[in-house]
Amino acid sequence: MSMRVVVAGGAGFLGSHLCERLLAGGAEVICVDNFLTGRPENIDPLRALDAFRMLRRDVTGSVDVAGPVDAVVHLASPASPVDYRALPLETLAVGAWGTRRLLELARRKGARFVLASTSEVYGDPQVHPQPEGYWGHVNPVGPRSMYDEAKRFAEALTTAHRATHGTRTGIVRIFNTYGPRMRADDGRAVPTFITQALRGQPVTVAGDGSQTRSLCYVDDLVDGLVRMLDAEHPGPLNLGNPSELSMLELARLVVRLCGEEVSIVFVPRPQDDPSVRRPDVTLAGEALDWRPRVDLVDGLSRTVDWFRNRAAGPPAALVP
Ligand code: NAD
């Protein structure tokens, strides 16, 4: 019998790729999403499939699904700085109440539960690269705190549910991921740089551009999520690509791949912007036999192609 998987946040960037991958692997998928930051067009092509069902629900309210469920993946949350700063209370609510509702659903159904946590739980890290044993350096009242602390609370709740009820939980800490279906206006560096360059506008790099990130292509990330669903490991496990580059290097690479003659300009760097970010993925390698495979030039080229083929969206503005 095929697996039945609830994907909360399935209409978002990562969620829609996960839905597709699960369906391609023969699973039945129930996508639960309220379209707070996701887009119907991400999952519209899936609606014709018998194995796909869409439930328009806010997961902070009661979430029930008829019939058996083998796994629940909790991806529901505003995820880009533009989104979570605009939706601070919603972000905290979905990290707290949303996580609780979905944990209860998994417990009732005897299902595996996987929480999509984030590298942001490490804050502006003082240990580099970041292993799972590092507790982080987070400002609890800073401009990113609604997201960082929501995820830290969600991890604590997930851990408590496992200890108290024996819920089969797993936590993954996702590092910056990019690919087709990112929103041009979500403020993250990859879609911002690409849309600026494709429009022939100057590419805006924050600060002096020396801050680093490690970028994982969406297919690799989804592969790690599927492996975590099939495993029993409690985590937390880092999922990300350890090849690190500075934002200035990224901007130059994007400009080259877009093939446009545009300048790079520098804009002020926001408060609490992490200066370095790179996952230690040793544990995920051992526990899930997982490693990222798509290199940056290949992944960025696919992403540039996708943006090139889309109709122009609203003006891009960088908010790292
Ligand atoms: P996204 O905004 O594209 O997707 C999130 C989805 O959750 C959206 O479809 C949104 O409508 C839905 N959602 C939000 N609140 C909801 C609610 N209360 N009820 C139902 N649905 C709700 O973001 P994404 O980039 O796909 O991220 C998915 C998950 O992965 C998030 O939890 C995010 O924190 C985590 N994550 C993503 C990245 C990344 O680089 N993309 C990095 C670290 C962690």
Image (tube, helix red, strand yellow):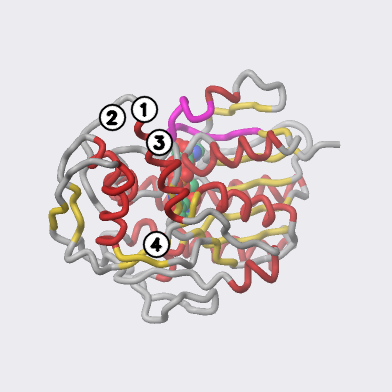
Indicate the amino acid at tag 1: Arg
Q: Residue 305 carries which label?
A: 3
**Viewed as shown, does residue 61 lie left or right of 181?**
right
- The residue lying at 37 percent from left, 40 percent from top is 304
Residue 284 percent coordinates (x, y): 63, 67
CA gap, disc 4 to disc 2? 28 Å
* 195 is within the stretch colored magenta: no
4 or 1: tag closer to the N-terminus: 4
Which of the two discs, 2 and 3, labels the residue nearer the N terminus? Answer: 3
Q: Position of residue 56 (x, y in %)?
A: 53, 28
**Cβ–Cβ under 8 Å for marks 3 and 4:** no
Cβ at disc 3 under 8 Å from ligand 1: no
- Res 148 label: 4
Disc 3 and disc 1: Cα gap in Å? Answer: 9 Å
Q: Measuring 37% from the left and 64% from the top, which residue is drawn there?
A: 213
Would you say the residues marked 4 and 1 are in contact, meaning their CB atoms lie under 8 Å apart? no
Residue at 50% across, 62% down: 241
Q: Which of the two labelled residues, at mark 3 and mark 4, occupies the earlier sequence position?
A: 4
Q: Where is residue 308 in the image (x, y as percent from the top left)?
A: 35, 32
State the extent of the magenta-drawn residues as a range: 30-43
Q: Residue 313 carries which label?
A: 2
Q: Nearer the viewer, residue 76 or 22?
A: 22
**Residue 310 — which label?**
1
Q: Residues within 10 Å of mark 1 (few under 14, many from 20)?
A: few
Q: How far apart are marks 4 and 1 (CA)?
A: 32 Å
